[in-house]
Image (cartoon, rainbow, N blue to C red):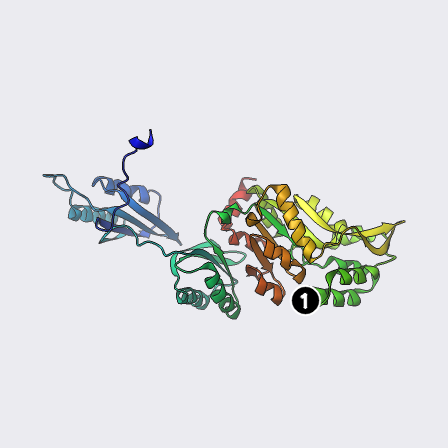
């Protein structure tokens, strides 16, 4: 059919066209949606909008339709007849029906659209009320709310229009901190699901440990190394200088310690689920680390990662020399590697996600299309696009609009 043959649309009425909002409430069962529209079909109405929600086995089904326009002399096809028929059908199924007359379609949404994802463990009514009020204070309107997940955290998403994304973020971030919940605000649009490369920090992000501290435990210098590490992660020390100082303390360790450390590494809860789900959905996944290739290479193989880059401990004659070889992966290096990975993956930076917790992740988080501070230091939380402060790495999926049901469905079809 050519464009000239396509009939004009009649299902999107102007503001002056009479419409009916048909609302059905009651116990859900198979066939209700088909039954309602079979009932409405007898009146030759056009469907303008549909929305259906099922909560704990109770259905709320809304249909916005054009009001019936009976042909001259037709009997039994008026708005009154439609109302009587719908009510009779609903009563026969022990449902409630409400029909509201009006004109035109739903009111247009305001300019500026965002997704506000709220993560709570638990999510209290007080928190939900405060977040909703804060959205309203920016001039935003909540168009829709739905649940993304019920575990390991409760995750709900507000579709908001009428407020700029940055304005929402600036108001909601301090509110969330005070309430003890996580709130992520991202602009609505196709780019959200189009983000096809995820790059993570390793220490205290993909894994629970600081790898250099695991090595230090074998060298008996944990306290010295931990002190330098903490200062570096706070941004108080130059990373490269602190790295050399810490690695020097490992000089003389037998190379067999590498395998021992690999066995001690603990993945962050949800790490496997995050990587597995992203891979099944067609994402490419990489890691960049200020730690060591002796560990990240093993993680790449274990998790099936696409990219991995880190510093390399020098080993000579079966001993750690206390030095690293090659270019240092520092704050600037992580951002550079993100760009390199994106180029190799054929993904623009706007479609990348970076996840990290320390000051040396900041350049990478800011360079990515979406930068996520994961259980991060305050300076990182304040600078990143969004922050997650629950100990489950797979909650990052919800920021991409991926629901727990989708994760479980992927697992079922493995």
Question: What residue is drawn where x is 53% and y is 68%?
Answer: 177
Q: Residue furthest top?
A: 1
Neighbour tally class for label 1: few under 14, some 14-19, many 20 plus, Cα within 10 Å: some
Q: Nearer the viewer, residue 129 or 139?
A: 139
Q: Nearer the viewer, residue 98 or 111?
A: 111
Label 1: which residue?
234
Q: Nearer the viewer, residue 2 or 149?
A: 2
Q: Residue furthest bottom?
A: 178
Q: State the count of labels.
A: 1
User: What is the quadrant of residue 246 in the picture?
Assistant: bottom right
Q: Is residue 295 left or right of residue 118?
A: right
* Coordinates of residue 291 in the picture (x, y in percent): 73, 55
> Is residue 57 among what the camera can see?
no
* Coordinates of residue 237 in the picture (x, y in percent): 73, 66
Q: Is residue 253 left or right of residue 350?
A: right
Q: Nearer the viewer, residue 343 or 40?
A: 343
């Amino acid at each position: 059919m050519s464009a000239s043959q396509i009939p004009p649309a009649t299902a999107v009425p102007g503001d002056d066209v009479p419409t009916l909002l048909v609302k059905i409430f009651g116990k859900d069962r198979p066939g209700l949606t088909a039954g309602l529209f079979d009932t409405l079909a007898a009146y030759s109405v056009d469907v303008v909008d549909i929305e259906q929600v099922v909560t704990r086995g109770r259905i709320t089904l809304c249909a916005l339709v054009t009001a019936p326009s009976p042909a001259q002399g037709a009997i039994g096809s008026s708005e009154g007849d439609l109302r009587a028929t719908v009510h009779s059908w609903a009563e026969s199924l022990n449902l409630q029906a409400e029909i509201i007359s009006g004109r035109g379609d739903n009111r247009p949404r305001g300019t500026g659209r965002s997704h506000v994802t709220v993560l709570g463990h638990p999510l209290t009514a007080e928190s939900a009320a405060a977040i909703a009020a804060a959205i309203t204070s920016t001039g935003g309107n909540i168009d829709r709310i739905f649940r993304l997940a019920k575990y390991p955290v409760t995750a709900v998403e507000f579709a908001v229009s009428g407020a700029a994304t940055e304005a929402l973020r600036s108001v909601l971030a301090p509110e969330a901190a005070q309430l003890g919940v996580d709130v992520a605000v991202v602009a609505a649009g196709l780019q959200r699901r189009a983000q096809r490369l995820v790059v993570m920090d390793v220490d205290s992000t993909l894994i629970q440990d600081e790898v250099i501290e695991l090595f230090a435990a074998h060298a008996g210098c944990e306290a010295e190394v931990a002190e330098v590490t903490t200062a570096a992660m706070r941004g108080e020390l130059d990373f490269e200088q602190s790295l050399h100082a810490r690695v020097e303390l490992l000089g003389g360790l037998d190379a067999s310690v590498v395998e021992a450390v690999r066995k001690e590494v603990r993945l962050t809860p949800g790490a496997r689920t995050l990587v597995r789900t992203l891979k099944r959905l067609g994402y490419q996944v990489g890691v960049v680390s200020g730690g060591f290739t002796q560990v990240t290479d093993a993680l790449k193989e274990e998790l099936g990662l696409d990219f991995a880059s880190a510093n390399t401990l020098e080993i000579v004659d079966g001993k750690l020399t206390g030095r690293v070889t090659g270019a240092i992966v520092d704050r600037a290096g992580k951002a550079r590697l993100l760009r390199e990975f994106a180029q190799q993956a054929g993904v623009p930076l706007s479609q990348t996600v970076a996840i990290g917790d320390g000051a040396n992740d900041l350049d990478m988080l800011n360079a990515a299309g979406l930068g996520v501070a994961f259980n991060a230091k305050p300076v990182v939380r304040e600078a990143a696009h969004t922050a997650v402060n629950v100990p489950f790495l797979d909650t990052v999926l919800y920021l991409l609009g991926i629901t727990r049901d989708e994760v479980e469905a992927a697992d079922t079809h493995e």
